[in-house]
Image (cartoon, helix red, strand yellow):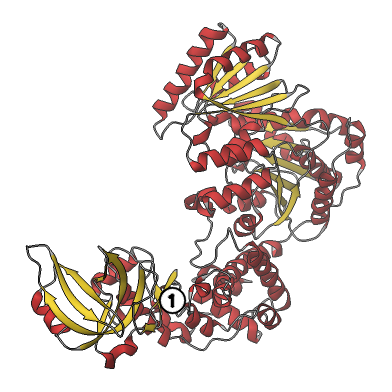
Amino acid sequence: MSGRPEQLFPLFAEVETLPGIGPKTARLLESVDVTAPRDLLYSLPYSVVDRRRRDSIRGADLPATMTVEVTVGAHRPPASRGGAYRILVEDAQSDFQLVFFHARASYLTRILPVGARRIVSGRVELFDGMAQMVHPDHVLPPAEAAEIPDFEPVYHLTQGVTQKTMFKATRAALERLPELGEWIDLAQLGREGWPGWGAAMRAAHAPQGKVETAAEAPARARLAYDELMAHQLTLALARRRERKARGISSRGTGVLRDRVLAALPYSPTGAQTRALAEIAGDMAAPERMNRLLQGDVGAGKTLVALLALLVAVEAGGQGVMMAPTEILARQHLDGLRPLAEHAGITLDILTGRDKGAERQAKLAALAAGEIQILVGTHAVFQPDVAFADLRLAIVDEQHRFGVRQRLELAEKGRGADVLVMTATPIPRSLALAQYGDMDVSVLDEKPPGRKPVKTALVGTGRMDEVVNHLRRAVGEGRQCYWVCPLVDESELSDLTAAEDRFRHLRAALGDGVVGLVHGQMPPADKDAAMAAFQRGETKVLVATTVIEVGVDVPNASIMVIERAEIFGLAQLHQLRGRVGRGAAESTCLLMFRAPLSEGGRRRLETLRETEDGFRIAETDLAMRGAGDLIGTAQSGLPRFRIADLERQTGLMQAAQSDARALLARDPALESARGRAARVLLWLMRQDRAIRLISVG
C-alpha cells in the first residue's frame, strides 16, 4: 500500500485552498497543528449559539443572544471622541438600541440606513433600564437572512482567527467529504445508534442545540471512537509484529516455585496467584510474551517477579531483572536472595560499578549459563553482555522505560518473553492508551500483614509539635522519612530547603540521628546515606523525592511530607507507600501551608480517605487530565482531538477489542472492512501503522 488513497486527497490539500484562508491565517492555524482541511474538520465546535428568529426581544430573559427583524430609527453619534454611537431600532413589539464603539459614521449609515428593515443578531443586555445590543454579530437585509444559521456553532479560536473565518472554512471543508467505506463493525454501529462517518462529521459541525455538542452525542461519540480505533489498530499491528517475532516456549516444572512457596510464612494473595498463572501461560506459548504487571504500592510484585523468573530457570533457561537505579537493583537483589536460596539457584548482580576482572568473570559465568538469574541496571544492555539462554526479561519500569528499550532488552534473548512491572497504578483508559500493545495483569490486593497507614493533615504552623512527636518516636527506636518539597525548578533552592530542614532537625534531635539525601549528591554519597538509614544507624532521613522509588526500610514507620499540597497525588501515594512495611503502626503526616487551593485540598483529602492506588489514580486523572498525569511530552500518549480519555474509557476498551478482533479475522486488512480500516489509518495520520501492515 504505497501512498495516501486518492479519495482523501481533497482533505489533505493545503489549508489555504479553503475560502477565507490566506497565507497569514494559514500560519496562525499551523501554530495549533491545523495544516489541512482534515484538521479543521477534526476541530469540532465546543458550543452552539441559538440564533433562531424571534418577533421581538420583549419578554426575553436578558442578557441573551437574540435574532430579530427591526426597522432602523434615528442615529445618535457620540457626544465626545471614543464615546458610544447609538442607533434606535424597533422590532414588532418593542424598541432598543444598537451600540457601536470606534465605528465610522459613514459605515454605519451605509449598513443601517434610517427607515430600512434589517435582521440583527447579537447579545442583548439591559443598561440603565434600556435594552441594548452592543456590536451585533450579524446585520443583514431580510433577503439575506438565510446566511444566519438557526444554530451557529462556536469554535475554539486561535489568536487572530475569527468565528466567521472558522465557520466559512469548515463549511467549505465539509463540501469536500468523500464517500468512505465503513470501518466500524456494523453490529456495533447499530447497537450504538451511530451515524456513518460523513453524516457524523456534518452533524458534529452543525449541532442543533447544546445537547449535540456533548461527548455522548451520537455523532461525536462515533468520531471519538474512530480516533481511538485508529490508535488501537496501530498498537495491535505493533503487537502482532512483536508476537510474530519468534518466541520461545518456556514450560516450568513447578519444582523450584514449590520450594519457595513452601518456605513463605504466608500464602500468596488471589491476585498474585492469578497474575502468575497469566504469566506462566504466556511463557509456555510459542509467541513472545509482552505483559504489563501493574501493582499498587505493597501489592507484592517482587514475589510474582521471582516466581516468573523461576519458570524460566525450571525450563532450563535464564532470567534477568532490570531496575532503573543501582539502589533499586541492590534492593531487588536483597529481596530475591533469601527466596532464591530456598530454590537453590544462582543469583548475581551486574551494574555500572562492576569493572575489570570482576566484570569479566560475571560475563563469563553468564555466557556459560552458570548465573541463572541476573539483576541489573541498564548496564545489562551493553553489547558485551551475552546470556547462554535468556528466556525472561523483567523491566521494573519506575520511570518510563520506553518501547524502544523493551525491544532492545528482548533482542538480548532472541524471542525472550518481556514482563514490565509498574508500581504506579494507571487508570484503565490510560493503560490502554499507553500500553495497548501489551496484555495487563493487575495486583489489586494487599498481602496479609501489610498494615494500613494512618494519614493526617497538619498545618506548617504546628512544626514544633511534629518535631516533638519525632523525638519521642526516635526514642522508642522508630525511624522516619522527612520529605522536603521540590520548591521550584532550580535545584539550588531544593537543596537549601533540604539542608535547612536537616540542620533544624539535627539541632532538635541530636548529631548522628539525622541523615540527608538529595539529587545534587554524588551517587556514592547518596548510596551511603541510604545504606546508613537502611541499617538503622540514622533514625531520620531528610530527603528530596529521590526516595519515592522503591526503597524498602521495614523499620521506618513515620513519613512526614512537607508542603504536601504542591506534590501530585500519585507521588504522595508512592511516598506514603514507603512506610507501613514492617510490624509497627505507621503514620504519614501531610504538612501543608494555608491557605490551600481547591485542588490542593481535594488531593490531600483523597489521600486521607483512601489507600487504594487505583482510586487515587482515577481521581488524579479526573483532576489533572491525561496529558499532565504522565507528562504528555515524554509519555508517547497520543493527542486526541475529539476523544476524551478521562470520560470515554468504555469506548477505548471497545476500540481495543474491536481492533484486535478485526486483525485476527483479516490480518492483511484486505476485506472490504479491512480496506476501509486502512483508509481510517491514513485519515488519522497513522503512517507508522501503515508501514506495519505492509511488513506484517
Percent coordinates x, y for residue 169 in the rendering = 34, 79
The residue positioned 53% from the left and 81% from the top of the image is 200
Q: Secondary structure at mark 1?
A: helix
Residue farthest toward the left in the current orientation of the protein: 80
Q: Which residue, given by chain and number where applicable, does mark 1 sit on? A: 41
Percent coordinates x, y for residue 140 in the rendering = 25, 85
Which image quarter holds the C terminus?
Answer: bottom right
Percent coordinates x, y for residue 575 in the rendering = 61, 32
Residue 626 higher or lower than 300, as above or below: below
As drawn, is 32 to the left or to the right of 143? right
Residue type at the position of mark 1: Leu
As drawn, is 481 to the left or to the right of 299? left
Foreground of the two, 157 or 421: 157
Which image quarter holds the N terminus?
Answer: bottom right
Location of residue 285 by image quarter: bottom right
Percent coordinates x, y for residue 2 in the rendering = 51, 79
Foreground of the two, 60 or 116: 60
Foreground of the two, 527 or 514: 514
As drawn, is 94 to the left or to the right of 456? left
Q: Is residue 127 visible?
A: yes
Residue 483 higher or lower than 33, as above or below: above
Residue 62 higher or lower than 530, as above or below: below
